[in-house]
Amino acid sequence: RGAAAATTDLAGTHVVVSAGGTREPLDPVRFLGNRSSGKQGYALARTAAARGARVTLLSANAELPDPAGVDVVHVGTAVQLREAVVKAAADADAVVMAAAVADFRPAVYAPGKIKKQGDSGAPTVELVRNPDILAEISAERARPGQIVVGFAAETDDVLANGRAKLARKGCDLLVVNEVGERKTFGSEENEAVILGSDGAETPVPYGPKEALADRIWDEVVRRVTPAHA
Ligand code: CTP
Ligand code: CA
């Protein structure tokens, strides 16, 4: 795309983007988290706003400035993110789950800081499953024609795993990138493939996160039927 800022092909739409990574508290000073920076989700929010969308950005612990012209809701845990997504999705034309959601959270939150006891030994942390937000909003669309987009990072059999995950989640588009020894999580050097539930397969070459974001919105624009147009 050469002139993304000049296009308004998302005008009249409300899009919801989740970004960053959830943190699951263990005690008042510790959490289970992940390395997601939030940069891809913020790039999606910025590019959608530039293309005329009303944008709600649900930010899970991303240490990035709020983008101009975007409604930003800050959340911490997967359970909080689920609540925010379900609420924002109610009148959304598209929902993009770019956040890295923790699959598990500690079964018990210790209200006081966990202390060492004695000279040896270590506690065992029991985990429970978090809700699968993407699967839930895909299965229970807030309105017919709403487009739901997921992300997946895979280490091997990228396309086969991506296709299986797309079917399992029930979303319309899944953005798959390969991670591995040289293509590390967080690095810019990942090429993505956008898979569609309609069989579409769109490779996106290495490039800035804005470029991938714009290619994702291109695929959304082709499928969306705006409620507010
Ligand atoms: N996701 C979600 N809720 C979860 C876990 C993941 O909404 N509890 C979303 C992510 O935001 C992402 C997509 O699902 O858009 C795929 O995440 P991924 O971790 O690859 O999927 P999982 O089903 O958790 O598969 P895996 O066991 O490979 O981690
Ligand atoms: Ca996961």
Image (tube, grey):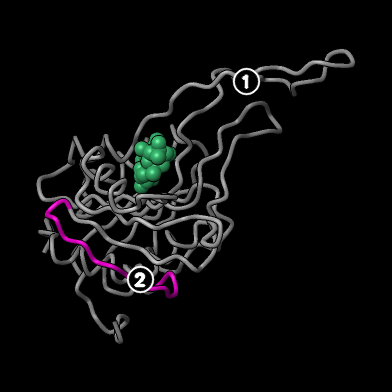
Kind of residue at disc 2? Thr
**What is the C-alpha distance between the residues marked 2 and 1?**
40 Å
Kind of residue at disc 1? Val
Residue 81 in view, yes or no: no
**Residue at (56, 44) in percent of width and height:** 34
Q: Going by the picture, which residue comes out furthest to the front?
A: 157
Location of residue 98 with respect to 109 vertically, above or below = below
Please give left or right for residue 51 compared with residue 183 in the image. left
**Residue at (42, 51) in percent of width and height:** 153
**What residue span does the magenta drawing correspond to?**
197-210
Residue 210 percent location from the top left of the image: 40, 72
Q: Residue 161: give its label.
A: none
Quadrant where the image shows the C terminus: bottom left
Q: What residue did someone put label 2 on? A: 47
7 part of magenta stretch: no
Residue 32 in view, yes or no: yes
Q: Nearer the viewer, mark 2 or mark 1?
A: 1
**Label 1's element?**
loop
Q: What residue did someone put label 1 on? A: 125
**Label 2's element?**
helix
Q: Going by the picture, which residue comes out furthest to the right?
A: 119
**Residue at (39, 63) in percent of width and height:** 70
